[in-house]
Amino acid sequence: MLSLAAALFLALWPESYQGTSVTTDGRAVEYSASLIEENGAQVLVWLLLPVAACLWAFLASFSGTTAARVAMWLMGLLVLAFVSILSVGAFYLPAALALLLAALAATRRRHAA
């Protein structure tokens, strides 16, 4: 849910792009746009990749080899977040931390059983 919230926020936030342009008569005009307005609907594919990784890890948490699968998707999400930390990566860090907690809980459940 956290990664989905981050994707929706990033896609629809109207202040993602801001700028100033000058008209031919010399007036300065400020503008802002969302990621979808600026880049088109194809940006949703890239924003939903971390959501898919979190969903996959959530579904993997119900299988027998839980900790390994969740940890694998956690590492992928963390790599994505840190590679893109200066743009959208910071919005996916809460989801990565939630996956980390899920992996730890799954490991404890497995050792307790």
Image (cartoon, rainbow, N blue to C red):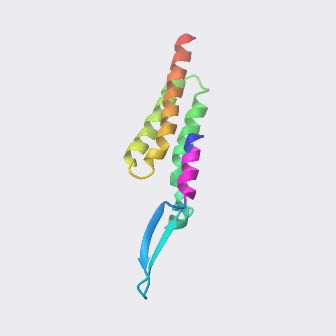
As drawn, 92 above or below 58: below
Residue 11 drawn in magenta: yes
Residue 105 x/y as whole percent: 54, 22
> Which residue reaches farthest front?
27
**Main SS of the magenta segment?**
helix
Bounds of the magenta span? 4-13
Could you say where residue 23 lies in the image, as x and y percent from the top left? 44, 83
Q: Residue at x 50, y 23 (%)?
A: 104
The residue drawn where x is 42% and y is 76% is 21
Name the residue rendered at 38%, 50% in the picture: 86
Residue 30 lies, in percent from the top left, at 47, 72
- The C terminus lies in quadrant: top right
For residue 76, side relative to residue 59 (left or right): left
Q: Look at the image and tell me whether residue 48 can be seen.
A: no
The residue lying toward the viewer, choosing from 43 and 35, is: 35
The front one of 79 and 96 is 96
Position of the N terminus, as image quadrant, is: top right
Query: Could one spot residue 104 in this view of the protein?
Result: yes
Where does residue 2 sit, x and y in percent of width and height? 56, 41
Total marks placed: 0
| Residue in the picture at 48% in, 46% down | 91
- Residue sitting at the far top: 112
